[in-house]
Amino acid sequence: MAEPLTEKQQVSWRAFVESSWALHTRLEDELRAATGLSMSDYHVMVVLSESPGHRARMGELASRLVFSPSRLTYQIGSMVKRGLVLKQACPDDGRGQEAVLTDAGMDALVAAAPLHLKTVRDSFIDHLDDDELAVIGRVFARIREA
């Protein structure tokens, strides 16, 4: 059995869990209300927009998004139906599949980005100074790697 958390650890853990859930809920609600996109839609489109040729192999995309393969398959299927992405065979390996950002997907991302950025600033960035942001960046990079 795991060792119980100290009071200080418990307070820190609860603050993280409660604030991160609240932040994610606000980001999701405001993005969906303003654009019809979910945070998962947005995240997929950002990663694809930053990928060469606006395309990525499904396995690589799942890894970058921290999605299970089945979750990514469902997400991409939903986005294909809305014309935001295409799913195509890999040109260099016919067995593999790639997700490809469509022009409509790029347009949706470009339209959503300023609205999402405002929520990110209002809900998170503007409440922290540069030193705090640097600590958060280091801490969560280390946690993600673990």
Image: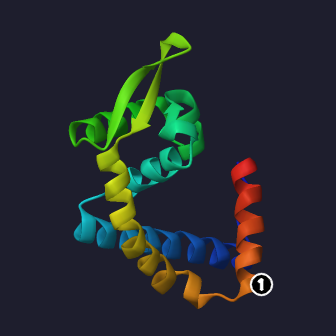
Q: What element carries label 1?
A: helix
Quadrant for residue 92, please give it: top right
Residue 98 sits above or below residue 117 on the image? above
Residue 100 in sight in this render: yes
Looking at the image, which residue sits at the far top? 94
Residue 38 in sight in this render: no
Residue 7 pos. (x, y %): 70, 78
Residue 57 pos. (x, y %): 53, 28
On the picture, is 70 further left or further right than 11? left
- In this picture the colour scheme is rainbow
Quadrant for residue 66, please give it: top right
How busy is the neighbourhood of tag 1: few (under 14 within 10 Å), some, or many (20 plus)?
few
Residue 113 sits above or below residue 70 on the image? below
Is residue 16 or residue 69 the one in the foreground? 69
On the picture, is 100 further left or further right than 134? left
Tag count: 1
Is residue 5 or residue 15 the one in the foreground? 15
**Residue type at tag 1:** Asp
Residue 58 pos. (x, y %): 49, 29
| Residue under pointer 1 | 131
On the picture, is 17 further left or further right than 73? right
Residue at 58% from the left image edge and 33% from the top image edge: 60
Is residue 88 or residue 119 the one in the foreground? 88
Residue 51 pos. (x, y %): 56, 42
Residue at 59% from the left image edge and 37% from the top image edge: 63
Residue at 63% from the left image edge and 71% from the top image edge: 13
Quadrant for residue 70, please give it: top left
Residue at 35% from the left image edge and 36% from the top image edge: 76
